[in-house]
Amino acid sequence: MRSAIMLFAAAARALCPRVTQPARRSIIRAAKSKVNKPRYATGMAKAVYRGEGLGAPSYDSAPIALSGLPDTTKPYAVLGIETSCDDTAAAVVRSDGTILGESVASQHEVHAKYGGIVPGLAKEAHELAIDAVVDEALQQAHLTMSDVGAVAATVGPGLEICLRVGARKAAHLASKYQKPFLHCHHLEAHCLVARLQTELEFPYLALLVSGGHCQLLWVQGVGDCSVLGGTLDDALGEAYDKAARMLQLSSATGGGPALERAALRGNATAVDLPVPMKKRKDCDFSYAGLKNALRGRVAEKRIERGLSDEDTLPDQDVYDLAASFQSVAIEHVEDRLRVAFKRVVGEAGASPTLALVGGVAANAELRRRVASVASQAGWRLVVPPPRLCTDNGVMVAWAAVEKASLGFSDEIDEEVEVIPRWPFREHSAPEPVKIAVKLASKAERATAAA
Amino acid sequence: PQNLAPYRHDRCASASTTTMRALRSLLALGAKGALGLATKPSTPAAAQLRLASEIQMERLGGIFGATAANGDTVCLSGDLGAGKTVFSRGFLRSASGDARMRVTSPTYLLDNAYDGRDGLPGDLVVHHMDLYRLAGDVGDAYVLDLDRTLAECCCLVEWPDRLEKEPTAALGVEIRLDGACRRVTVDASALDGDHPWRAAT
């Protein structure tokens, strides 16, 4: 293999003796990438793709199944548990992608049920919630723990105590019923769920937008995501929520959906708001400036209408402000997407795809405008159904199916170590190819201009 | 050791004179305290400032971040967009010495922890918490492991009024909006007399 590359490189050197050093390197890189193109087919070992420097990924180790693997010759079910932050969720998913059972319990429902007054009860409330949610998921799937092929849980990133509840429950089940146990990365699970119900090959771009996260990720495989850009202050979902609060909009499902509904009835060009970071051409997001600008406009409107701070604004003003805010917030996303498309188009292959994931993917206006930007740039858009975009157990179970299909599983340790901080590595752009361009002489340029 | 102005990139050109004088007098007070010179016994452990820009808010956070230690707590109160996270950003950037450190809002994630991996010195761990989304019941305190965290780590708590029992022995920073400016009240009266933040205030 190496000799083939060396021969090719020698031939390149021979054919174009004056090719400059960087260009020659890119020819060699192109040759290597054809020969050693990473293939993430089922059963293929893939440890970590370093993606650095020239050439092929390094296969550090053979796949390690520390707690065994399910029988991959026929469909098997995976129980996935997700408890990284607020919600407790579990689901049972079959390895062919069928969702057999799912259940989600919001933390506040549990505390409301228990009144939250007795101190020790809070710990039990968490642990009772996980039992209830796991039992419901299994019940819906009409399976018992002995029928399940593997158990998976989010071990990070998130809040340590919450992660521990889910991870230890999963480890306990895996140990008790002697099942393979798999760790999952919360954000990676969000990205991988786009592959559950759609044909989606690696690598692809993922725009992860939720209340807590706002990132552009380059997903090259399981265990191989890199960050193109993230938020400097507020996430998109958080910006929506705070804007809704400023406009005194709220609903049972949260400020974001309420603002989306209000925006439908408003005029998006009525209020002038600044698009964040127009001058910076990178993939980072920032919504704090927009939040402040909105606050300023709300105050101005109040003065204009002769209202005091406590009075509510007239409905149409609220709708117009909501629509303008949403329009500018999404324009910022569009800007960043265009930059991201340019940055990764070289690695994207023949049919570049963007996956829109995370809770805010449920916003119809965002989906519509992202679809438009993607199609203008020649990219395909994949969006999972809304209930798979918010935190759920299905994505964890599916991420485990993907990991198990590559031959990995993790050791069963009842005192499992959770990983509250588990950042992805930064995406390193491939070296730009330097091309030698012969500039016209001064005289030629002068005659051309005349 | 006068490391109270740690930024390598000084972009404070547009600061108003009055406010810079106020900040300099804060620094001077800090110097007096550090050198052990007596401050008048009737010196109030509270200061009021009027800040004209985000950069000044970050610098204010930086003054306290420079002398942060495990066990310290800052309670940040103020409305949406007041500058609580900007203060925290200045605090963390000064504590780590990294002027470009990324510090995002913890509103949804509830608690962002920073430690040696982010450049914080020694075993300093800073928890940047935001209780805005919490309903204020006991279960929330459990989820954040508040008792242990407040005692063992340095904490920046946004929206502390969501807690039933606000942390005692904390630096109180209250930020009020005043047009395009911010009026900040820093209150160190709950801290011990020899705490560096008391002198800084």
Image (cartoon, coloured by chain):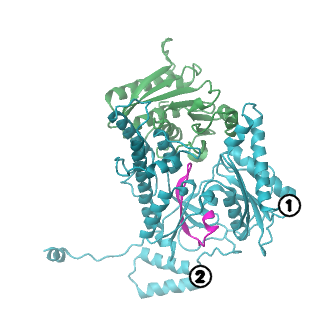
Chain colours: A cyan, B green
Neighbor class of circle 1 (other Cα within 10 Å; few <14, some 14-19, many 20+) is: some
Instruction: Report the disc number at residue A2.
Output: 2
Where does label 1 land, which residue? A178
In the depicted structure, whether residue A270 falls above or below residue B70: below
The chain containing the residue under callout 1 comes to: A
Q: Are the residues flagged by discs 2 and 1 in contact, CB closer than 8 Å?
A: no
Residue A291: quadrant of the picture? top left
SS for dot 1: loop
Please report, as a chain letter, where disc 2 is located: A
Circle 2 crowding by C-alpha within 10 Å: few under 14, some 14–19, many from 20: few
Report the Cα–Cα distance between label 2 and label 1: 44 Å
- The answer to whether A118 is drawn above or below residue A150 in the figure is above
Q: Nearer the viewer, residue B46 or B198?
A: B46
Please report the bounds of the magenta region as a residue range: A193-216
Q: Is residue A206 magenta?
A: yes
* Mark 2 or 1, nearer chain start: 2
- Looking at the rendered structure, the secondary structure element under dot 2 is helix
Considering depth in this image, is A149 or A133 the residue closer to the camera? A133
Under mark 2, the amino acid is Arg
